[in-house]
Amino acid sequence: FFEKLKTIPNLILYAKNLKTRLPIFAFNIKGISPFDIAYELSKKYHIETRAGCACAGPYGHDLLGLKDNQKLKTKPGWLRISLHYTHEKEDIDYFFNALNKTIVKLSH
C-alpha cells in the first residue's frame, strides 16, 4: 500500500511509523482540498473517506503548521482512509485508480 501511495505526486503523508501501525492513513495532496477529494470519491466511486482534522482541531492545526488565531482561507484538514482485513487487492487497486482520476480532475 505504501509503495503505491508514495508514487502519487504532491502527496503529503502524515505518518512517522510505516511498519507497525493501524491501517488508517491521513494525507493531503498539495493544492487540492481534502474535502473536495472526499466528496468526489464518495459521489463518483462510492468510496467513503473522511476529510477534516479527525475531531482533533488543535492537534490538527499543529500538525498542519497553523498558528493560533491565524486567519484561514480554507477549512484545514486532511483526507483519512481506513483499510480493513477484508479488503482485497482489487479493492486497493480500485481505490488508487479512483484517487488518481480524482486528483487529475481536481487539478484542472
Image (cartoon, rainbow, N blue to C red):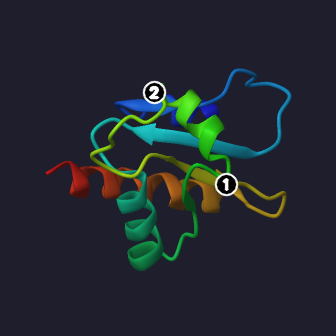
Viewer-closest of 59 and 2: 59
Q: Amino acid at mark 2?
A: Lys
**Which residue matches tag 2?**
67
Q: Identify the mark nearer the N-term, 2 or 1.
A: 1
The N terminus sits in image quarter:
top right
Viewer-closest of 1 and 70: 70
Looking at the rendered image, the disc whose residue lies closer to the viewer, 2 or 1, is 2
**Residue 35's spot in the image, x, y percent?**
41, 59
Which residue sits at x=23%, y=58%? 105
**Residue 54's spot in the image, x, y percent?**
65, 52
**Residue 72's spot in the image, x, y percent?**
33, 43
Which residue sits at x=24%, y=55%? 106
Quadrant of residue 9 within the rendered picture: top left
Horizontal arrangement in the rendering, residue 17 relative to residue 30 (left or right): right
**Residue 66's spot in the image, x, y percent?**
45, 30
Q: Amino acid at mark 1?
A: Cys
Which residue sits at x=41%, y=78%? 43
Which residue sits at x=38%, y=34%? 70
**Which residue matches tag 1?**
55
